[in-house]
Image (cartoon, rainbow, N blue to C red):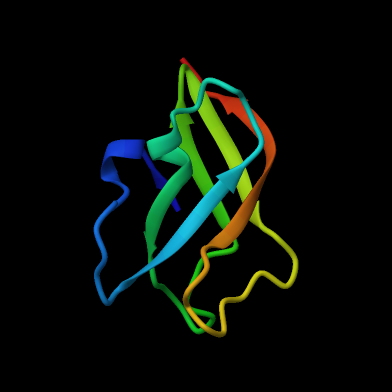
């Protein structure tokens, strides 16, 4: 999934799931780290998130075993790498 922080939802809906983005650059705003992501596919959630930041993308992957059987706690995605936007 690729989106800017503004396109992530901060309100609760039936078709989204709460997620936390951990790691990466310290200047990523808190509102971009605590987001609601759309539920997709068979597993219900993509394994990767790509966040637009500065002149590139920050990549996050779902933590191994990060499931929410109770749906009360957020799914954790850890930072893996960054890429630059080609000119």
Q: Is residue 6 left or right of residue 46?
A: left
Count the marks: 0
Residue 7's spot in the image, x, y percent?
Answer: 27, 44
- At horizontal 27% and vertical 77% (from top left) the residue drawn is 14
Residue 45 versus residue 8 in the image, above or below: below
**Where is residue 52 drawn, in percent x and y?**
44, 32
Farthest residue to the right: give it: 64
The residue shown at (26%, 65%) is 12
When the figure is inspected, residue 87 is found, relative to residue 60, above or below; the finding is above
Given residues 27 and 48, the one toward you in this image is 27
Location of residue 65 (image quadrant): bottom right
Left or right of residue 34: residue 27: right
Question: At x 39% / y 72%, what residue is drawn?
Answer: 39
Residue 22 in which image quadrant: top right
Residue that appears at 46% across and 78% down: 41
Q: Which one is nearer the viewer's eye here, 11 or 63?
A: 11
Q: Position of residue 37 (x, y in %)?
A: 39, 60
Rendered view: 36 above or below 54:
below
């Amino acid at each position: 999934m690729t989106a800017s922080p503004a396109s992530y939802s901060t309100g609760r809906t039936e078709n989204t799931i709460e997620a936390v983005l951990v790691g990466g650059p310290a200047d990523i705003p808190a509102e971009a780290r605590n987001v609601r992501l759309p539920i997709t596919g068979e597993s219900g959630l993509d394994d990767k998130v790509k966040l637009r930041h500065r002149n590139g993308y920050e990549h996050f992957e779902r933590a191994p075993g990060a499931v929410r059987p109770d749906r009360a706690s957020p799914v954790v995605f850890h930072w893996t790498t960054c890429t630059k936007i080609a000119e």
